Amino acid sequence: MKIFKNSVYSVDFLQATKTIRFNWEEGHKNMTYEDFQEACSNFLGYGFEYQARTILIDVRDFQFQLPPDFPEWQEKEHYPRYYKLDIEKVAYIMPEQYVANAKEIEKEAGRFELRNFSAYEPAMNYLS
């Protein structure tokens, strides 16, 4: 079910798996870092509204250059919202050539597990 769409991103909720799906739209190429952070915050707001338990993020066409301090922001500002929402699993869909070197996270108490895939179906199987 589509719950939000603008020129930068769209958000869907998949009821069967309680998954919030985040997709970057064509207009994201022209966003600022503040726009990026706002998009990340907004999509998690829908996660709270729909009580999501898993997250699917499609970055196959992501073309925005993140700044060097992005990992620090992600760890200190963004991931704590995942913990508060009690997210269990996160799946990224990305180009095949990046999957082997992409960061994955093991499940720990109070935290989520993160895995990377090159196609939609295996990512959804993981989240199910």
Image: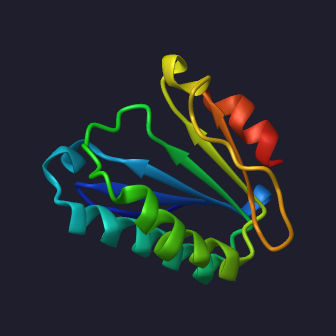
Q: Quadrant of residue 48?
A: bottom right
Q: Quadrant of residue 13?
A: bottom right
Q: Nearer the viewer, residue 33 or 43?
A: 33
Q: Residue at x 41, y 74 (%)?
A: 42
x and y, in percent, of residue 23 in the image: 43, 48
Q: Is residue 49 above or below residue 5?
A: below
Q: Is residue 94 above or below residue 85?
A: above
Q: Is residue 42 above or below residue 22?
A: below
Q: Quadrant of residue 8?
A: bottom left
x and y, in percent, of residue 27 in the image: 19, 48
Q: Residue at x 70, y 37 (%)?
A: 123
Q: Residue at x 59, y 82 (%)?
A: 49
Does residue 118 appear anywhere in the picture?
A: no
Q: Check the image and tell me how it is coloured.
A: rainbow
Q: Residue at x 60, y 40 (%)?
A: 103
Does residue 72 appear anywhere in the picture?
A: yes
x and y, in percent, of residue 78 in the image: 50, 71
Q: Residue furthest left?
A: 30
What is the quadrant of the N terminus in the image? bottom right
Q: Nearer the viewer, residue 45 or 5?
A: 45
On screen, residue 28 versus residue 4, left or right, reads left
On screen, residue 68 versus residue 100, left or right, reads left
Q: Nearer the viewer, residue 68 or 55?
A: 68
Q: Is residue 43 above or below residue 26?
A: below
Q: How many marks?
A: 0
x and y, in percent, of residue 74 in the image: 47, 64
